[in-house]
Image (spheres, rainbow, N blue to C red):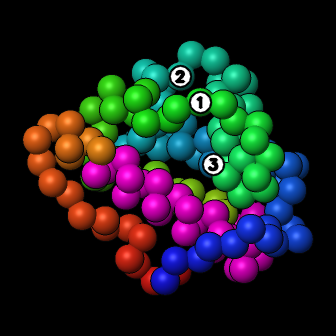
Amino acid sequence: MTVLTNQPHPSIDPASIERLVTTFYGRAREDAVIGPIFADAVDDWDHHIAQIAAFWSSVILKTGNYEGRPMAPHLKLGLKNEHFDRWLDLFEKTTREIFPRDAAIIFIDRARRIADSFEMAIATNTGQIAAPRHSRRPL
């Protein structure tokens, strides 16, 4: 099931998004699977966290605060399916801890579709074909 909404949950605001992003990256940086990727890719953590908070605010709250093209930097990282799996595991766990279920699934649904999009783009760039793996799972 795909959740499409223009009405964010009342518990979602810029401060809660910043808390989500900060908590998630605190965990991701320590993670054995994806931590090394972030360590190599991110030089300025304060800037990165602010940028990703702006991204999620734009996606969920429709703020328009994010002005970037996230696909290109991710294509250069050599990411594999197991990296996306771990990213989603940590992100979903963090989201479910911070938000009530109805709000969490808004983020989780979007994150799964983003992961699918990135995986399919990576496959295409390597001459392969990939099908969505994450967005088809039950929320």
Query: Would residue 34 be seen by someone viewing this image from the given angle?
Result: yes
Q: Which residue is mark 3?
A: 24
Q: Nearer the viewer, residue 101 or 7?
A: 7
Q: Which mark is residue 68?
A: 1
Question: CB atoms at circles 1 and 2 under 8 Å apart?
Answer: no
The stretch drawn in magenta includes residue 114: yes
Q: CA distance from mark 3 to mark 1?
A: 20 Å
Which portion, as a residue range, is magenta? 97-120
**Rendered location of residue 58, percent (x, y):** 72, 47
Check the image and report above or below for 34 versus 14: above
Q: CA distance from mark 2 to mark 3?
A: 15 Å
The stretch drawn in magenta includes residue 44: no
Image point (57%, 16%), residue name: 43
Image point (43%, 21%), residue name: 40
Q: Secondary structure at mark 2?
A: loop
Name the amino acid type tagged 2: Val
- Which of the two labelled residues, at mark 1 and mark 2, occupies the earlier sequence position? 2
Horizontal side, residue 115 vs residue 12: left or right: left
